Amino acid sequence: MFARRIATVAPPAFHVVLDAVDRHEAAAIDRTFDEAAARGYFAAIIVPRLRGADEVADMIKALLTSERWSMELVQWRQNDRHRDVAIGMKWKTKAGDDSAAMGFAPLGSMPVSRRSPYVALVAWPGPRQNPFAKPQPGVGFIDATHGLTRARYDSTTKKSSDQTKVLFLDPPEDRVLLRRVAFCLPKATVASLR
């Protein structure tokens, strides 16, 4: 619910890649993210022709050719998945803040709430604009402008959190950990990223 609300106030700027992402495309994506930040929009990469985990890993490698992208392997805290690895992706804003990106993919290894028909990566590329968000390192979705009163913000985020809890019951997911995770990929695929 919260994501739906902020998408109407700060709509995404899309960068669509029809072929494989390479280092030249990574530079163009950085420019799209900077332009989105200047307009107060979210930034999204959509790669509709990617289908497999290996292709997602290749996209990650291409993004890492830009010094503005970074990756981390996130350790499972609970609900450990022995076959999958959690991967965090961050994009550095012009102001130097790390912005945690949220990934989407048509893969069974992805959490239910992140399965989509296309591979995509979305981030908040701008500064903190949410007066009600708790301070945190870097910036993220929570920092986007939303245009809500405090009471409406609190009720919307509570409803959104409650719905997420239900989505993450089966299979069980760690919703707090997933805030730091862009993609969940099979271990064999992630070996190529190290």
Image (cartoon, grey):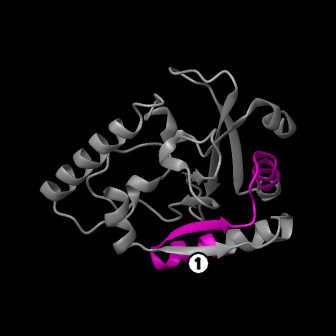
User: Magenta span covers which residues?
Assistant: 32-61
**Residue 29: where, in percent of width, then height?**
70, 70
Rendered image quadrant of residue 44:
bottom right
Q: Residue at x 59, y 61 (%)?
A: 93
Question: Which residue is identified by label 1?
Answer: 35
134 left or right of 112 in image? left
Depth order, front residue of 122/51: 51
Residue reaching furthest to the left: 151
176 left or right of 102 in image? left
Task: Residue type at mark 1: give it.
Answer: Glu
172 left or right of 96 in image? left
Q: Residue at x 63, y 55 (%)?
A: 91
**Is 19 colored magenta in this rendering?**
no
Q: Residue at x 80, y 53 (%)?
A: 55
Vertical order, 35 against 114 (above or below): below
**Is 57 colored magenta in this rendering?**
yes
Vertical order, 154 against 30 (above or below): above
Depth order, front residue of 144/56: 56
Q: How many marks?
A: 1
**Residue 184: where, in percent of width, then height?**
64, 39
**Residue 171: where, in percent of width, then height?**
48, 30
**Residue 100: where, in percent of width, then height?**
55, 49
Q: Residue at x 39, y 40 (%)?
A: 167
Q: Is residue 41 visible?
A: yes
